[in-house]
Amino acid sequence: MEQPMMLTEQDDKVRKALEKTRELSIPDEKTMPVLLKLLEEAGGSWSLVKLDNYSALIDAVLSVDEENKKLTEGSSNGNRGNTLSEGSSNGNKGKNPKVIDSPVSLKKIYETRSATSGPSVQVVQNSTGDRKRKYRNRISDITKGSESVEISLVDDVGSEDAPKFTYIPHNIVYQSAYVHVSLARISDEDCCANCKGDCLSADLPCACARETSGEYAYTNGGLLKEKFLDTCLKMKKEPDRFHKFYCKDCPLERDHDNGTYGKCDGHLIRKFIKECWRKCGCAMHCGNRVVQRGIRCKLQVYFTQEGKGWGLRTLQDLPKGTFVCEYIGEILTNTELYDRNIRFSGERHTYPVTLDADWGSEKELKDEEALCLDATICGNVARFINHRCEDANMIDIPVEIETPDRHYYHIAFFTLRDVKAMDELTWDYMIDFNDKSHPVKAFQCCCGSESCRDKKRKGSQGKLERRKIVPAKKQSGSKVVAFKR
């Protein structure tokens, strides 16, 4: 007598399949019976299960779930026709369904769905009983292989088109921005050329640690040290307690054509992380190389249900001080940013980030030297991070890697506390929602924080037009509009 096929999560193939369905919040108890049925139909071959990056399995699970719901509703109305579940006719009403359909049923369900509309179509039933199709965006990897980990995109709501942008894993210069990166500019004093292996394992801090008060910002486990992290948070929450640099001729207020110079609001001289780089003698696995190794966390872009549009969440537990991702975009001058805002007026945008964390070490900056990052057209997964007032779970920290003068640096996100799997990752944009004079109109905040700074949100029912830039009346000069963070 032929032995029935058995599946266990200890099997590496089963584990990988369950990881994919868990990304869509599909419980294992729904996946396992469908997975078993598909394998039985395919004679034990995994080719159908793994088709289109497990879309065959995902669609089969969704199809069975939909059919079970339909038949459960039919059972409650006295309609006890064809069944996919033993529980549909014995009072269980579809709970913990055991698939008992014909040997080719699941395969046919998947092939029918794929042939008619691809693996991203969900068949649903509305209140009147009429069946209609609702599209679910699902992309297995929005990075197209450019990151070391896949980052999926899902839309369980089905109300939004997939975002259109070009994914880039590293910052790129748009046009006129002045960014000079070369090994020749890095002197022996700016690197640890004599180090070997892992700098963190040495008895004394290397030369690169000089930039972080003579000690490393990272622990041996690759996390940001708690003391360093807490100081960065204090600087962001209470900037007036720390040193600022005030420009005599601030690039953010400069208006050449009118010959006017606005009052500089001050630029916070922030704490920096100095990582080892190519001219250093240590290896790539050195503990002082974290941000430059790129994204390592399992992340997912998803469509939120709180009116915030697309958001970013983690698919794994993240301890406090974990590097999540870098803010990647086009490097623009502030003049170029102003022109771009005028050109794309009325469209959805991501907010730009002004690279002014160490302007105090520079002379008065020229227009082409006052830089910002804009992820509207080209960017990475960080463009989906939503704002949250006061109690966000991530913080942005400047990181110096390939330039010694901090004229250009990287913006890295680290967790401020332990973050559980499936929690949304958020960041406080530090927006003053009451600033009527700023040329970038603040969005209606839907962060949900008890300390939300946007008091106007109460009583408003409209859907948020997220991150919408509305420039002020165009001037003849080139006054910029970048947010200072």
Image: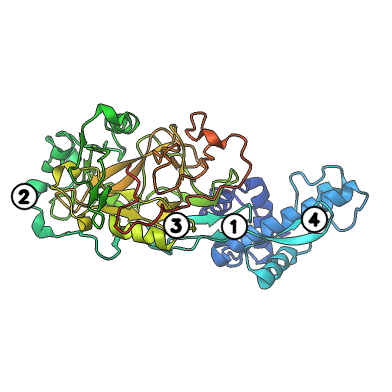
Whole-angstrom CA distance, mark 2 to mark 1, is 52 Å
Give the number of the mark in front: 4 or 1: 1
Q: Which residue is mark 2?
A: 188
Report helix, strand or loop for mark 3: loop
Report helix, strand or loop for mark 4: loop
Question: Which mark, by number, is residue 395?
Answer: none
Decide which of 133, 164 is in the foreground and name it: 164
Residue type at tag 3: Glu
Callout 4–callout 3 Cβ contact below 8 Å: no
Give the number of the mark in front: 4 or 3: 3
Q: Which residue is mark 4?
A: 84
Q: Which residue is mark 3?
A: 150
Q: Is 120 displayed left or right of 133 in the figure?
A: left
Whole-angstrom CA distance, mark 2 to mark 4, is 71 Å
Callout 4–callout 1 Cβ contact below 8 Å: no
**Could you classify mark 2 by the number of other residues whose Cα lies within 10 Å: few (under 14), some (14-19), or many (20 or more)?**
few
Q: Earlier in the sequence, mark 2 or mark 4?
A: 4
Q: Earlier in the sequence, mark 1 or mark 3?
A: 3
Q: Position of residue 171 (x, y in %)?
A: 30, 58
Residue type at tag 2: Asp
Q: Which residue is mark 1?
A: 160
Q: Earlier in the sequence, mark 2 or mark 1?
A: 1
**Image point 63% across, 42% down: which residue?**
461
Q: Position of residue 392 (x, y in %)?
A: 44, 36
**Could you classify mark 1 by the number of other residues whose Cα lies within 10 Å: few (under 14), some (14-19), or many (20 or more)?**
some
Residue type at tag 1: Glu
Query: Could one spot residue 377 in this view of the protein?
Result: no
Whole-angstrom CA distance, mark 4 to mark 1, is 32 Å
Callout 2–callout 1 Cβ contact below 8 Å: no
Report helix, strand or loop for mark 1: loop
**Image point 25% across, 50% down: which residue?**
254
Residue type at tag 4: Leu
